Image (tube, grey):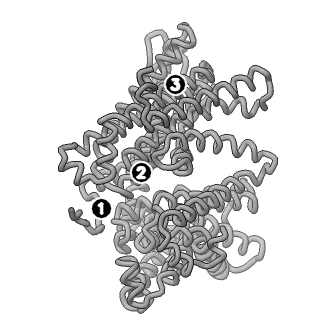
Amino acid sequence: MKMIKNASTASKKAFINYGIVIVFFVVFQTLVSTGNITSALKGQLIPITCYMIMAISLNLVVGISGELSLGHAGFMSVGAFTAVIVSSLMDGASNPARLLVSIIVGAITAAIAGFLIGIPVLRLNGDYLAIVTLAFGEIIKNILNCLYVGIDDKGVHFAFNNPNALGMDPLGKVIINGPMGAVGISKIATFSGAVILLMVILIIIQNLVNSRTGRAIMAIRDNRIAAESMGLSPMKYKMLAFTVSASMAGAAGAVYALNYSTLVPKKFDFNTSILVLVFVVLGGIGNMTGSLIAAGVLVVLPELLRKFSDYRMLVYAIVLILVMLVTNNEKLKGKIDTFLKKFRMNISKGGRKK
Amino acid sequence: MLAHLINGISLGSIYAIIALGYTMVYGIAKMLNFAHGDVIMVGGYVSFCSMMYLGLPAPVAILAAVFVCTVLGIVVERLAYKPLRAATSLAVLITAIGMSYFLQNAALLIWGANPKAFPNMFKNIEAIEFAGARVSPVAIVSIVANLIIMIALTLFTTRTKVGKAMRAVSEDKGAATLMGINVNFTISLTFAIGSGLAAIAGVLLCTAYPTLMPTTGSMPGIKAFTAAVFGGIGSIPGAMIGGILLGIIEILARAYISSELADAIVFGVLIVVLIFRPTGLLGKQVHEKV
């Protein structure tokens, strides 16, 4: 209530985002309960919500902190596989409790991973930083490909690169099986649970961005040297944004994992990181509303294009390229008018029609 | 050990040829061309089709692949990247990713998802015995091709007028324009050379690892990009050193540590190098001015 009273433009924007999430939830929940939804789309509801969380958390790094990260899916997988272990350990507890604890532990593990990875990554700049995040994403995927986890009466057993080293009781159950991934996950994630998580994360991000800390992060993004001379520590604030973003990706991964009965580490490869980055860039860098909408639309779009069947991914690619060309040329039209004249002279007509 | 080392150098040579395309395009257009890996795949398919369906001899098939990829490189640059020359680097990156999706899915529609067995061009040539190690002909061809390409490119960029223009554009686009250099032509030429090299790399890669799929190019593409960064992006000798080191590390890790973890080790070494030399092995250290 206090926030509404002193509503600034920033918090008005925040409320628009909360509104979007609520409308998204109400519309689809109604569609589900009235049965007016295709089963394919219904199955996509939890992944869509997870991708929305991924998009806004990546936007915190790419948009607010200004670092290009190409390994966001790595943190998602850390959260996902942690959640699988935690939820298996809590077999017997009530489902919401299992989901909640899995999300929290998944988020914490991903935050630790983010912190450790952030130490070398954030020392670098620009494209070098991007390639190292990509490298870490691939490393996480490879390590998870070699991970074997089993549960028996004595507790959890871990093995690396050798499934026979688990040393379990014959009655024990293997829950993570190397490249085959997690098997027999109990599907305890719910759409409402996912939306609540999205809402909580949105609130955290909006308040972080509009706080003193958030302004410090953006100041470092805009001009690191000027910010540093104002006494702000770039490493500290970049690390904060990176770790918070990683933990949110971990939470999203936890919900995502608990929506499927099996999950392979390969699911969280470079392409998934890129997919999330596409949401962020198409939605508008630094714009949370855009990220939410882009994630929603772009996850559903291939589904809507189903009637093109084989051609749908091709159409998706063409749409992506056209959107980038159109939006970026129009931005030029509005912003740099003088430059545009030169642009018009140089550019071939065929190129501009695209 | 020697056999692994030679295999590593040969795989590294293929990476180096691909990395050259990344590094030249990055140097001149300051963009990460993510579609580059898929040009490799197109090169592989074109040579495959010319050999299997048209019955052309291998050298003609390679030329066909180079020709198609060169044209493809120019067309992609003209249609997708040129209109965005003034846009933010992220916008160009996403467009390149879109182009990569496009090429992969187009290949999927044309050639199907089933892996194709690439014909062995060196069927009639025996593996060569070298100091007790058996070396496959494709390994030798890769290494020789890499050396030739590297020498030719170095001569091209330092001795010819167009090559010098290329270096001038990568140094300062505005100043190059003032000197009467046709920037658009130079950038197109860079894409053409890079894509032509990718076609050669594609043929070599598919001969060494004979499964051809629409996603064949993406992982070698990422690794070659890593190699380019490893050696210092923008530097031609850097791409060669980075590529070869990466190939050796990958093959040795696969042979002595674990094939599952080989990629992780490759990327791990990259990270260690970048921590101590933040612009790669041969990259120029640019000091920030306030």
Mark 3, secondary structure of its residue: helix
Q: Nearer the viewer, mark 1 or mark 3?
A: 3
Mark 2 vs mark 3, CA separation in Å: 25 Å
Residue tagged 3: A197
A352 lies left or right of A334? right
Task: Identify the mark nearer the N-term, 2 or 3.
Answer: 2
Q: Residue at x 70, y 30 (%)?
A: A43
Quick one: A331 or B84, which is closer to the camera?
A331
Callout 2–callout 1 Cβ contact below 8 Å? no
Vertical relation: A219 (above or below) A353: above
The furthest residue to the front: A5
Q: Amino acid at mark 3?
A: Leu
On the same chain, marks 1 and 3? The answer is no
Instruction: Name the image quarter holding the C terminus of chain A.
Output: bottom right
Label 1 is found on which chain of the structure? B
Q: Tell me the number on the disc at residue A68.
A: 2
Residue tagged 1: B279
Q: Residues within 10 Å of mark 2 (few under 14, many from 20)?
A: many
